[in-house]
Image (cartoon, rainbow, N blue to C red):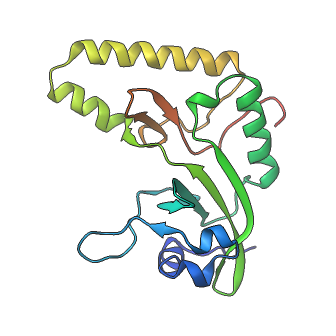
């Protein structure tokens, strides 16, 4: 069994991007850091990966590092991206790119998934804001957007596999966006 790096291993490694990344673009990555301590912020952590916000080639991205072996692979992400485009739901998801052997941690090379950074709030925080603002119209609009998203996903034959508040973001335009596709299903799978 492969011994993947831990979240802490990645956390330590990315503090020196020029030394640990193999791709020249990633070597110049600038990670979002804590304003007081200057150490990378960890915006998301799950059962299979950790995600850090970085600026790469002038673009905000989410860099996803795997902490255990899962069903994810370059082929999986490429197939998902093609499906999202072909079925017209690319505007509902954070686009992604699989990068083989992109980071060296503990003497081994590991893949990185570069994802579009979606500026916004997790679904639960967005709803909390609507409730605190006593905004029933906003809640109604969100419920309508949710039904529309689920209908589009069904028509596109796309099952997310882990629809929970941390994987559903409401962007700055109020649009629902999905992230984390490791548990997703489409017909080619």
- Does residue 86 appear in this view? yes
Number of labels in the image equals: 0
Q: Position of residue 132 (x, y in %)?
A: 15, 29
Q: Position of residue 184 (x, y in %)?
A: 67, 38
Q: Is residue 132 above or below residue 113?
A: above
Q: Residue at x 73, y 30 (%)?
A: 85
Q: Residue at x 23, y 26 (%)?
A: 130
Q: Which one is nearer the viewer's eye here, 145 or 71?
A: 145
Q: Is residue 145 above or below residue 77?
A: above
Q: Is residue 61 above or below residue 93?
A: below
Q: Position of residue 23 (x, y in %)?
A: 70, 71
Q: Residue at x 28, y 17 (%)?
A: 138
Considering every residue shown, the one lying at the far bottom of the view is 107
Q: Is residue 86 left or right of residue 124?
A: right
Q: Is residue 168 left or right of residue 69?
A: left
Considering every residue shown, the one lying at the far front of the view is 58
Q: Is residue 86 above or below residue 169?
A: above
- Does residue 182 appear in this view? no
Q: Position of residue 57 (x, y in %)?
A: 57, 61
Indicate the quadrant where residue 106 lies.
bottom right
Q: Residue at x 81, y 37 (%)?
A: 189
Quadrant in the picture for the N terminus: bottom right
């Amino acid at each position: 069994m492969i011994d993947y790096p831990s979240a802490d291993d990645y956390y330590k490694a990315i503090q020196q991007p020029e030394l640990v990344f193999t791709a020249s673009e990633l070597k110049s990555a600038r990670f979002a850091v804590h304003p007081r301590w200057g150490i990378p912020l960890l915006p998301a952590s799950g059962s299979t990966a950790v995600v850090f916000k970085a600026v790469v080639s002038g673009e905000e991205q989410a860099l996803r590092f795997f902490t255990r072996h899962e069903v994810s692979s370059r082929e999986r992400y490429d197939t998902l991206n093609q499906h999202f485009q072909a079925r017209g739901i690319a505007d509902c998801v954070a686009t992604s790119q699989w990068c083989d052997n992109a980071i060296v941690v503990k003497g081994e090379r590991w893949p990185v998934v570069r994802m579009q950074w979606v500026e916004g709030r997790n679904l639960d925080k967005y709803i909390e804001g609507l409730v605190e603002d006593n905004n029933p119209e906003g809640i109604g609009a969100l419920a309508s957007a949710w039904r529309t998203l689920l209908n589009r996903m069904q028509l596109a034959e796309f099952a997310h596999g882990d629809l929970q508040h941390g994987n559903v973001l409401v962007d700055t335009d109020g649009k629902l966006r999905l992230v984390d596709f490791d548990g997703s299903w489409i017909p080619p799978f």
